[in-house]
Amino acid sequence: MGTGATTEAAGAPAPANMADLAGKHIVLGLTGGIACYKAAELARLLIKAGATVQVAMTDGATRFITPLTMQALTGRPVFVDEWGSQGGDGMAHIHLSRQADGIVIAPASADFMAKLAHGHADDLLSTLCLARDCPLSVVPAMNRQMWANPATQRNVAQLRADGVAVLGPASGDQACGEIGDGRMLEPHEIRDALIARFQPQRFAGRRVLLTAGPTFEPIDPVRGLTNRSSGKMGYAIARAMADAGADVTLISGPTALEVPWGVTRIDVETALQMQAAVMASLSATPRADVFIAVAAVADWRPAAPQAQKIKRLKDGPPHLDFIDNPDILSEVAHMPSPPFCVGFAAETNDLLQHADAKRIAKHVPLLVGNLGHLTFGQDDNEIVLFDKDGAHPLPRGEKLFLARQLVAEIAKRMGSD
């Protein structure tokens, strides 16, 4: 299992996900810590995503990265102290917070989080956080022992209780040479978490189970039966659902894609493994409210996979017998009191006819169809939604853009929009 981040849908391409923060003004606060070097890349990514970025730094942060660096990246003067050195009326803590759509502190030191938890305001950055009327996110970065200290954990609990989003920390190698929890999240993970905060929370409190990617059916230890699915569409939907507030479990076939932020991934290889993982997840309490079968599951598997590599035969290729794999979507849809089921159909011809027939046969309220051979591995897609009222094409677009549209359509049909 793991957590992380990723993306992946007639007509002109729709707006890309890189504009997800268009029109948003973000105050990026830096506190003292070696992870300040990551803030430079974070600022760049936020701007690339369409945001304007205003940097405010503590004096400690300036010991690790210069205000000039952050000014060059953002194109805006950097605020460091509360005494009006940047000019104006000496009320930077008010103006900065009122102009912001969101404030993110990255890195957030243990000391700074303690200030926030207890309402201390003895510098510009802590003062503007206290004076804010917009969402606040903190991204912890510290030594593993500092993170695990009971005082820090009490402060984190208080921040969460106060409505502050605590992003991370991650676990891994630390600058001090130790290994453990306390690493600051990577810039792209922070960007994705901030994007999620601005998405409509249509699925807050709901659980979503989703399959993605191909399956691989072994013929022998080195060969197998698979398909060209990249998993990009499924991973995009997983991210869009997580951004919409859902608790998302992603059961994934073999793919090199990174796990979307806030998503739990279970790795499988074969159709039988995927079936077992799906049914185990659906037996958990509370059960998933939505099941989305995006994975391109192999229809058949070799009846008798060989334990050793099959050698080339002088009299021609070996004869292989195949047997049917389980129909996971149909099995879930025919459960007593099933979750809201969404299927996918990747066709190569006669999409309208084949996809609607599949929806009816599998007994699902919504099915998404596309010409898979044209979109496998691509970053954009063209899809058609099928329900009892007919076919509803969506404009061609980047896969995350389409995934968000699909989430909205599912919410509408479930009465949560």
Image (cartoon, rainbow, N blue to C red):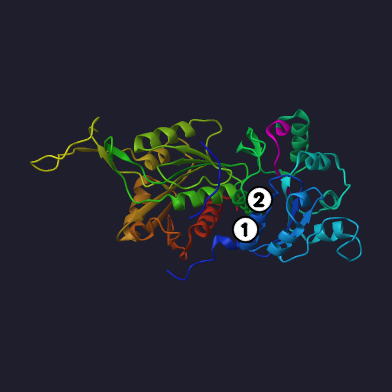
| Residue 153 included in the magenta stretch of the image | no
For residue 172, above or below residue 353? above
Q: Which residues are magenta?
A: 137-147
Q: Position of residue 191 (x, y in %)?
A: 63, 53
- Name the secondary structure under disc 1: helix
**Residue 63 can be seen in this image:** yes
Residue 282 in the figure: left or right of residue 111: left
Q: Position of residue 272 (x, y in %)?
A: 35, 34
Residue on which the image places disc 2: 38
For image coordinates 52% across by 45% down, the residue present is 259
Using the numbered discs, state the Cα–Cα distance from disc 1 to disc 2 in whole angstroms: 11 Å
Residue on which the image places disc 1: 45
Q: Say few, some or many: other residues with alpha carbon within 10 Å of mark 1 (under 14 / 14 to 19 / 20 or more).
A: some
For residue 166, above or below residue 404? above
Q: Position of residue 30 (x, y in %)?
A: 75, 51
For residue 403, above or below residue 309? below
- Name the secondary structure under disc 2: helix
Task: Give the amino acid type for the residue marked by disc 2 in the picture.
Answer: Lys
For image coordinates 91% across by 57% down, the residue present is 83
For image coordinates 71% across by 59% down, the residue present is 69
Residue 302 in the figure: left or right of residue 312: right
Residue 220 in the figure: left or right of residue 336: left
Name the residue nearer the viewer: 312 or 248.
312
Q: Quadrant of residue 82?
A: bottom right
Tell me which label, 1 or 2, sits earlier in the chain: 2
Q: Say few, some or many: other residues with alpha carbon within 10 Å of mark 2 (under 14 / 14 to 19 / 20 or more).
A: some
